[in-house]
Amino acid sequence: MPGYHHYQSCIEACLRCAALCNHCASSCLKEEHLHMMSRCVQLDMECAALCYAAAQLMSLGSEKAMAICRICAEACEACAAECSSHDNKHCQECAEGCRKCAEECRKMSA
């Protein structure tokens, strides 16, 4: 059963994305107009949780890795779309990380 080495690129993209999402959520909470960032924060937190879960299941060589990666890709795409709509640096960095993670997860689950 494939594990870490087989999925290494996707695992690394997921962990990077989760870190960027956490940074983005934390930074959004410090924005002056917090109410305008609430959807971004919510999607950041959901995306990070799914990225961590996907990385863990791939590391374990789980039979559920492909399924969670499909869901993770969807969450990453939604988060990237939201973050792309904001001009601040942390959202732009997060959007880029989410797009890369979605790409890796789509390749893995194809």
Image: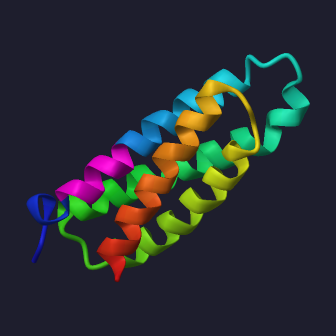
For image coordinates 88% across by 34% down, the residue present is 36
In the displayed structure, does residue 50 sit left or right of residue 34? left
Residues rendered magenta in the picture = 8-15
Does residue 29 show up?
yes
Whole-percent x, y for residue 63 in the image: 26, 79
Which residue sits at x=62%, y=26%? Answer: 89
Q: Quadrant of the C terminus?
A: bottom left
- Figure label count: 0
Q: Nearer the viewer, residue 80 or 21?
A: 80
Q: Is 21 rendered above or below residue 54?
A: above
> In the image, residue 59 lies at what x, y percent?
20, 58
Which quadrant would residue 35 be assigned to in this image?
top right
- Residue 66 placement: quadrant: bottom left
Position above or below: 74 against 84: below
Q: Is residue 73 magenta?
A: no
Q: Position of residue 30 (x, y in %)?
A: 74, 17
